[in-house]
Amino acid sequence: MRLWQSSHLLLQRIRCPLAIAVGLAIGGTVLGVGCRGSGQSPPQQGGRAQRRPGAAFRDCDECPEMVVVPAGSFMMGSPPSEFGRVYNESPQHRVTIDYDFAIGKFPVTRAEYARFAAESGYNADYHWKEPGYLQNGNYPAGYVSWDDVKAYVRWLSDKSGSKYRLPSEAEYEYAERAGTTTANWWRDGADALCSYVECSDDGIGPVGSHPANAFGLCDMAGGVHEWTEDCWHRNHDGAPTDGTARTTWWFGRCDDHATRGGGGGGPAWLHRSAIRQGYFSDDRANISGFRVARTL
């Protein structure tokens, strides 16, 4: 872990479209149904006709469930007045994503990662099997490095015949906000924290245990920190404004990468949509996980 990381990471370590879960913003409060609630249509397989914004699909039986996110524009980062804001979230700037893309409805689970390890023979560190907290196959995969998840993405692309990747930081924040401009996507902040994120001692629970946001995406805040494609930069100076990732940093090198989400069982300001962290590419921690994205 880098010394320049925000101190709130240390605090964390101490301690669907209409057919799927959707949160509806009404009077400043987001009303959501459980990510695995009843009455949901199963994700569809194959066929570009179903790839409309909000649609859920799988490219294969073993592939993660994906949700199509619509094109749009948003303000990335946090304003100076936002409680809990840190320097690396500035300057706030407008990003326009002029393409639809798909992103995992959930973080990749332990069961999905185990299938990859078994089928590919990838020699991943054994700690993903024993991340330091009780879990089953429906928990998010943890203790994985950026290098590990890139190996998973290559395997998934080969297996499915589709182009999978990690989301960029901009895509992740856009998808997490889902049209909101408040510090937390559920708008109610600290008063409703445990209704929307895992508040157990570990701060990590089964995926899909809480309501989805307005794009039908689950667990975008709370739980594990999720790797993105971006090289780590100390702030948003010079960041792309088109949704793409920053893939170089110091003299063309990229030894560190940004994560999004997370927050564990901490307070609401740790679950803000703008919060970001950086890790070495080969770092593994029990709170590091990921979800995949898909070019359409």
Image: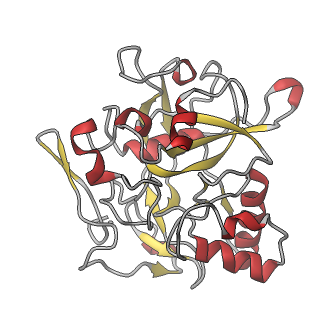
* Above or below for 140 versus 242: below
| Percent position of residue 70, x then y | 42, 52
Q: Position of residue 291 (x, y in %)?
A: 57, 59
Q: Is residue 86 left or right of residue 143?
A: left
The quadrant in which residue 188 appears is: top left
Provide residue 289's location: percent of width, then percent of height: 61, 56
Residue with the most extreme bottom position: 61
Q: In which quarter of the image is the N terminus?
A: top right
As drawn, the residue found furthest toward the top would be: 80
In this picture, residue 48 sits left or right of residue 234:
left
- Residue 188: in sight, yes or no? no
Position of 192 with respect to 222 (left or right) is left
Q: How many labels does the image show?
A: 0
As drawn, is 33 to the left or to the right of 168?
Answer: left
At 84% from the left and 78% from the top, the residue drawn is 121
The part of the image, by quadrant, that contains residue 149 is bottom right
Image point (50%, 46%), residue name: 262
Residue at 71% x, 39% y: name it: 279
Does residue 145 show up? yes
Q: How was this image coloured?
A: secondary structure
Question: What percent of the width, then of the height, locates residue 76?
Answer: 47, 29
Give the position of the C terminus as an image quadrant: bottom right
Q: For this rendering, which residue is in front, 176 or 113?
A: 113
Depth order, front residue of 199/153: 199
Q: Residue furthest left?
A: 27
Residue displayed at 62% across by 18% down: 237
